[in-house]
């Protein structure tokens, strides 16, 4: 077993190095992308036994396209408008995501300026071809849905969206009809549905059965495991890819866990933080295709990406995670 304290000390040293390196980059004009690429490589190579391994990819059942298992959500974190410092920081988040082998970038028109910020940054970084762009339609009526999706494409600054989802199942019959038409015309590549709460899972299940979308996006975490009962098994049975939002749970789960000592078994699955443990808990379920933790910090993005490397917790360790989460309150 690895010396966990030694690994945590090394991770702290890497973070300190990052801060110093970025200050040097600013002072001497070194491109941020050079520094951030080095950061991602350094943090992703942290576990010696996985130093050369790429991020795992899982197949989208309907198209057989491989998708990296860790992406990035944009709720709140990308809603920075025209703030220059915020844009620079988020550009670094995307650089780290792509350098780590990730691609999924999920947004919504209800996330303030997040779509426009993401599109601006993808253009700035010449990275539209690196991103798997997922966004949503969240309105009632056919014409309103079309107008909203046209605006999302304008904000993302690209003529085609990889995944368009009906957000929270709002007017899903109307919107799915438009999505199927747009998919047939090549304007979107995949169709999905979403909901953020388990109280809606009965309706989600019904739509999955009747419509068989390419994707379903749901909440699932170590402190919210309702999806394990029916949604995740059904997705596997129907061949529907699963995006997991809120992998860090609700009510400040990650903040609570940060005050709990990381147990020795965390090193056995290559984890040096509770964030990685919680992400690996989600990814240990084979029905999950990709997890999209939101972050506005490049160092957190690098840490999150490492959850896509190495071993996942077996049933015994998953139970240990559930117990630790329960004990944290």
Image (cartoon, helix red, strand yellow):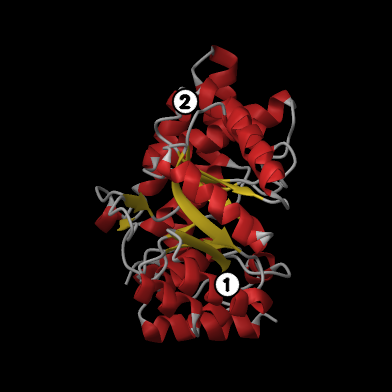
Q: Nearer the viewer, residue 106 or 195?
A: 195
Q: Position of residue 203 (x, y in %)?
A: 61, 75
Q: Nearer the viewer, mark 2 or mark 1?
A: 1
Residue at left offset 73%, top offset 35%: 80
Outermost residue, top side: 29
**What residue is shown with label 1?**
204
**Disc 1 secondary structure class:** helix
Q: Nearer the viewer, residue 163 or 76?
A: 163
The quarter of the image holding the N terminus is bottom left
Q: Where 90 sits versus 29, above or below?
A: below
Q: Where 44 sits versus 241, above or below?
A: above
Residue at left offset 41%, top offset 76%: 265
**What residue is shown with label 2?**
33
Q: Position of residue 300 (x, y in %)?
A: 55, 48
**Disc 2 secondary structure class:** helix
Q: Nearer the viewer, residue 38 or 61?
A: 61
Residue at left offset 56%, top offset 26%: 157
Q: Position of residue 317 (x, y in %)?
A: 41, 81
**Is residue 23 visible in this depiction of the protein?**
yes
Query: CA separation, marks 2 and 1?
Result: 41 Å
Q: Residues within 10 Å of mark 2 (few under 14, many from 20)?
A: some
**Is residue 89 visible in this depiction of the protein?**
no
Left or right position of 190 against 140:
left
Q: Nearer the viewer, residue 192 or 300?
A: 192
């Amino acid at each position: 077993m690895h010396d966990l304290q030694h690994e945590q000390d090394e991770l702290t040293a890497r973070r300190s190095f990052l801060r110093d390196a970025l200050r040097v980059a600013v002072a001497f004009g070194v491109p941020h992308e050079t520094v951030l690429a080095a950061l991602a490589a350094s943090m992703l190579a942290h576990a010696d036994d996985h130093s050369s391994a790429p991020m795992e990819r899982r197949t989208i059942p309907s198209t057989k396209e491989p998708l990296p298992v860790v992406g990035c959500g944009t709720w709140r974190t990308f809603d920075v408008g025209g703030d220059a410092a915020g844009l620079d920081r988020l550009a670094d988040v995307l650089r780290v995501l792509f350098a780590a082998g990730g691609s999924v970038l999920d947004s919504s028109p209800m996330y303030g300026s997040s779509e426009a910020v993401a599109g601006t940054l993808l253009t700035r970084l010449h990275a539209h071809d690196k991103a798997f762009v997922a966004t949503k339609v969240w309105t009632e009526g056919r014409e309103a849905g079309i107008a909203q999706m046209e605006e999302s494409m304008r904000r993302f600054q690209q003529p085609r969206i990889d995944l368009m989802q009906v957000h929270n199942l709002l007017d899903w019959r109307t919107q799915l009809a438009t999505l199927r038409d747009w998919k047939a015309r090549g304007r979107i590549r995949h169709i999905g549905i979403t909901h953020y709460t388990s109280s809606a899972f009965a309706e989600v299940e019904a739509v999955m059965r009747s419509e068989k979308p390419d994707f379903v996006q749901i909440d699932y975490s170590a402190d919210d495991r309702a999806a394990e009962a029916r949604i995740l098994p059904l997705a596997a049975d129907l061949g529907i890819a699963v995006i997991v939002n809120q992998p860090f749970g609700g009510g400040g789960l990650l903040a609570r866990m940060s005050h709990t000592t990381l147990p020795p078994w965390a090193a056995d699955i290559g984890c040096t933080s509770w964030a990685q443990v919680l992400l690996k808990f989600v990814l240990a379920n084979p029905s999950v295709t990709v997890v999209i933790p939101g972050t506005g910090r490049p160092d957190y993005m690098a840490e999150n990406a490492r959850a896509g490397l190495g071993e996942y917790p077996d049933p015994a360790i998953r139970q240990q995670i559930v117990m630790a989460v329960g004990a944290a309150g």
